[in-house]
């Protein structure tokens, strides 16, 4: 239930997600009773009635959680494999998302493996710069990547300012040339008017 809240699933989506969370006997039970299941709460109630006795009720709840966590792990692993930093996504946000996915896949994941996943999806414009720093831990990556991203953003801002200055200078020069041309045309006209025919 907490996993549904974590992903922001509404009631209808929770019911629709049930078959994806179950495996083996639990899935077969669901298929056999699909007509009776109208809510996740009702599914839990029916499932517990079927598989629990008064002495084993405490054993079933962890089993239900295990079914859900297996699918959550699988989904998180798929996301982790394919997750890439988007063009406008700050490196800190990307890093936090990858670390979150790593924890969902395996809470005890080695830091070296986390680092590989992080490096695999980082934006190309940062990848070379970060790789040259050769971070050995995910924390070191985070530190290097933030500094590099900040430095590159300053460079980009400087380039934009220089481009704006070039555009301003070009516009000023253009206006100056136009005024000179207008002035010359005006002088020619005055000269032509002063010349007797």
Image (spheres, rainbow, N blue to C red):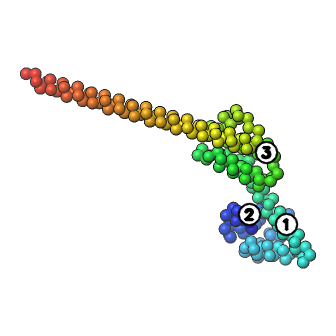
In the picture shown, does residue 132 fall above or below 10? above
Q: State left or right for residue 161 relative to residue 1.
A: left
The answer to whether any part of residue 78 appears in the image is no
Q: Residues within 10 Å of mark 1 (few under 14, many from 20)?
A: few
Image location (x, y in percent) of residue 122:
67, 42
Image location (x, y in percent) of residue 17:
73, 65
- The answer to which image quadrant residue 34 occupies is bottom right
Cβ atoms under marks 1 and 2 closer than 8 Å: no
Closer mark to the observer between disc 3 and disc 1: 3
- Label 2 belongs to which residue? 3
Q: Under tag 1, what secondary structure?
A: helix
Q: Which image quarter is the C terminus in?
A: top left
Q: Which mark is residue 189?
A: none
Q: Nearer the viewer, residue 35 or 109?
A: 109
In the picture shown, does residue 80 fall above or below 193? below
Q: Under tag 3, what secondary structure?
A: helix
Q: Under tag 2, what secondary structure?
A: helix
- Label 1 belongs to which residue? 62
Residue located 78% across and 73% down the image: 43
Label 3 to label 2, Cα distance in Å?
25 Å
Q: State left or right for residue 134 relative to residue 85.
A: right
């Amino acid at each position: 239930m907490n996993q549904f809240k974590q992903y922001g699933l509404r009631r209808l989506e929770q019911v629709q997600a049930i078959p994806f969370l179950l495996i083996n006997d639990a899935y077969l039970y669901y298929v056999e009773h699909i007509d009776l299941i109208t809510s996740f709460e009702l599914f839990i109630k029916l499932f517990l009635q079927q598989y629990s006795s008064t002495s084993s009720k405490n054993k079933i709840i962890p089993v239900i959680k295990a079914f859900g966590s297996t699918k959550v792990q699988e989904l998180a692993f798929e996301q982790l494999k394919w997750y890439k930093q988007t063009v406008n996504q700050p490196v800190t946000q990307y890093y936090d998302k990858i670390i979150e996915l790593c924890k969902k896949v395996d809470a005890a994941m080695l830091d070296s493996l986390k680092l590989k996943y992080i490096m695999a999806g980082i934006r190309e414009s940062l990848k070379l710069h970060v790789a040259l720093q050769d971070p050995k831990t995910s924390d070191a990556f985070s530190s290097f990547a933030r500094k590099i991203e900040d430095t590159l953003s300053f460079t980009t801002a400087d380039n934009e300012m220089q481009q704006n200055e070039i555009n301003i200078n070009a516009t000023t020069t253009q206006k100056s040339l136009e005024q000179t041309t207008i002035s010359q045309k005006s002088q020619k006209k005055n000269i032509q008017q002063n010349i007797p025919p």
